[in-house]
Amino acid sequence: MALGVCYYPEHWPEDFWASDAQKMRDAGLEYVRIGEFAWALMQPAPDIYDWEWLDLAIETLAAAGLKIVLGTPTATPPAWLTASEPAVLRVGPDGRRLAHGGRRQACLVNERYRELSRGIVSDLARRYGLHPAVAAWQIDNEIGNHGSGRCYCDHCRAAFQHWLQARYGSLSALNTAWGATFWSQTYSAWVQIPLPADPVGGGHNPSLVLDYRRWASAGQVSYCRMQAEILQAHSPGRPLLTNIAPGDDEINWFDLAAEVDTIAWDNYPHGFPDWQAVALFHDHVRGLKQKPFWVMEQQPGPINWTPTNPPVPPGQVRAWTYQDAAHGAESVLYFRWRACWLGQEQYHSGLLDQASRLSRGYGEAQTVAQEWHAHGQPVAAPRKVALLISYDDLWAQQLDPHAQGWSYWRLVQTIHRSLTNHGIGVDVLRRGADLSGYSLAVAVAPMLADPIEAAGWMDWVAAGGTLVCTPRAATKGQDNRTVGEAFPADLTDLFGMDVAEWTALDPARPWEVTFTNSASITAPMWAEVLHPTLANPIARWGGSYAAGEAAITACTYGKGLAVYSGAYPTEALLAELWPRLLPSAALLPANIERIELTDGILLINHSEEAISVPLPGSWRDRLSNETGTNSCYLPGLGVRWLTQ
Ligand code: GAL
C-alpha cells in the first residue's frame, strides 16, 4: 500500500518542482501521477515534440525518491489536431459536434483519432517506458466521463452497422433478434440501420438501443486495449491502470477492467449521496477484477463541481483514506497537489493551498502515512455475500424503467446500503461470476435471462448457497425481447414459484407487504404476485386487490435456499429479510461503518458526532494499543482498527 498525489508540473514554475517533490516525501507520499492532460505540451505541432520539460519533471520527482505514474494524454487532444481533423470530434445525442476547449471531446471509435493516439502513446512509451522511476501507467483519464462514452458521428454510424454485421451475420438474423416485424422495422441493407439519436416518432426499438449501448461500450474498451498493447510492448513489467469516474455508466466497467492490470477509480465522496454509496463504489471496483484496486484520485478537501461544495471537517480526509484501504484500495493518490491558479478547476482544493501552505488534507495524509508505516495498512477480509449486477440489465432498465422512479443503480444502492448498515461486507460481482466461497448472493433485477447462468445458480444453491432475487428477474432474453414463458424464465424450478401477475405501482398508491408475525411495510414502485408451486410464502401482499397473495417466497432447493421478492426491496423490507437469512446481521448505529479486515474490524464514524459503539468481547485498538474494551468510543469522523 502506498499514498501518493496527482501533480501537474506544467502548471507551476520549474523552480517549484524540487521543493514540491520534497514536501511530497515529507508527507510520506510515494507515488506521483503526472502527464495525463499534457498532449499539447508534449507535441506542440504535428511534427514538433518537446520532451525537455517532462524529462526535467521526471528527473526532479525521481531524485526525491518518488515513483511516477505516467498518464497518457489522450483525454485532451491539442487544438492543432482538432482544428486540422475536425472529424475526430465527438457528436452528442443532440446531433451537435463538440468544439475544442474542455476535454474528452474526441470520438474514441474514430480510426484517425486512434491513429493519432497510437502516435503520442508510442512516443511517450518509447521515451519513458524503461525509465527506472516510471512505476506504472495510467491509460487516458476517466474514459467515458462527461458523457463521452457514446458518440453519434458518421464514423460511429458505419462502425455500429459493421459491428452488427459481425454480431448477427445476416440481416434476417438481426431482424429476428430485434423483432423487426414490429412497426415495419425490417431492414434490407445494413446502411438502413439508424443510430438511437436519430429523431423518430414513438422511440427506437429497445433491442436496437441495447445493442448500440453494448457496441458503444465495446468501442471505449477496445480503445483502452489499443493503448494497453502499446504500453505493454514498450514498458514491460510496469502495471497498467486506468481510472474510472463513478456515475459514468455508459461503459461496462467489468469489460474495461479486464484490459488493465489494476483498475483504479476517482473517489470524490462529495459527489455521492452518502458514505454508503462510496462504500458501494469501492465494493463495485474491487469486484471488477476481484482483487485490490487503486484510488487514483482521492478528494483532499473541498471540491468545485458539486451543487454546494461544502466544507470538509477535520478528520474527514483521514477517515476517507481508511475507508479506501479497508475496502481494498492498495494505493491512494490525492487529487491534487496544489490548488490551481489556472483553468476550469480553480476552486478545487489540494494538499497545498494556492499560496503553497500545507492544507489540513496534507496533515491528514501525513498522519495516515505515519500510521500505516508504524502499524501496517488495513487489509480487507474476503466477503461472504455477493451482489450480482450487470451493465446490460442497467442499460435495458434505463431504456424502459416502466415504473416512475425506477432506477437500477438506486436499487443496487438500496440493497448495498442495507447490507452495509447491518455490518455485512459485500462483493459486487458481475452476473455469471463464480459464487463458490460465497454463502449468500443477491441478484439485482436480473432482467435479461441467461439459461447457462440459471443452471449455475441451481447447482450453487443445491450445494448450500442462498440466492435472493429481486423483482424484474428473467423477463427478457439477451436481445431485450420478452420471453414467451412465465417469469422468471429458466428459474421457476429453482424458486418454486412463478410470477402470476406483475405491475408498476402508482407512487401515490403503494401496496403493503406483511412478513409472518410482523407489522405491514409500505411496498412502493413494483409488485409481482407470486404463485408458489414448491416455495413457501414468507411475506404476503396487502393494501390492494392482491391481499393475501404471496409477495416473497422461500424455496428449499437441495442444501440451499432460493428467495424471490416480488416486492421492491426498500430498506424497511430488507431490514425484515436479512435477520431471517443472515444470522450475523444486526443494525449498526447510524453512520457507523464496520468493515471486516483480515486481522479484525475497522470502525469508522462517518458523522461529526462522537458515539460509543457496543461490541461483544474485548478488543485491542491497533492504532493506540488501548486494550480490553467492549464498548468502543469513536470521536466525530473517528476511525478505530480493532483486533481480537
Ligand atoms: C476528476 C478528473 C480530474 C479532475 C477532478 C476534479 O474527475 O479525473 O482531472 O477534474 O475530477 O475533482
Image (tube, grey):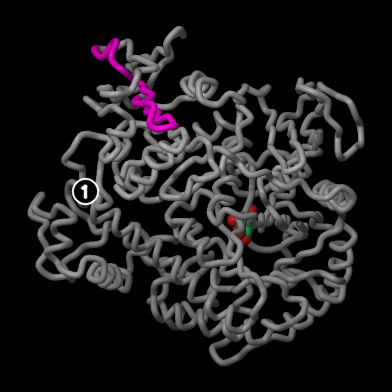
Residue 344 seen in the current view: no
Give the quadrant of the C terminus.
top right
Q: Label 1: few (<14), some or many (≥20) within 10 Å?
A: few
Position in image of residue 329 (x %, y %): 68, 52
- In the rendered view, tell whether residue 596 sits above or below residue 131: above
Q: Is residue 25 magenta?
A: no
Q: Is residue 182 left or right of residue 334?
A: left
Label the magenta part by its dominant secondary structure. Answer: strand
Q: Secondary structure at mark 1?
A: loop
Query: Quarter for ligand 1?
Result: bottom right
Q: Dividing the picture into quarters, in which one does residue 357 lie?
A: bottom right
Give the tally of numbered discs.
1
- Give me the residue at 66% from left, 58% from top: 296
- Whether residue 434 can be seen here: yes
- Between 510 and 45, which is closer to the camera in this rendering? 510
Residue at the image position 66 percent from the left and 57 percent from the top: 294
The answer to whether residue 179 is left or right of residue 360 is left
Q: Which residue is mark 1?
A: 203
Q: Residue furthest bottom?
A: 47
Compared with residue 207, is residue 63 higher up or lower down, i.e. above or below?
below
Residue 216: percent from the left, percent from the top?
37, 62
Horizontal side of residue 67 vs 99, given as left or right: right
* Three-letter code, disc 1: Gly
Q: Which residues are magenta?
A: 545-566
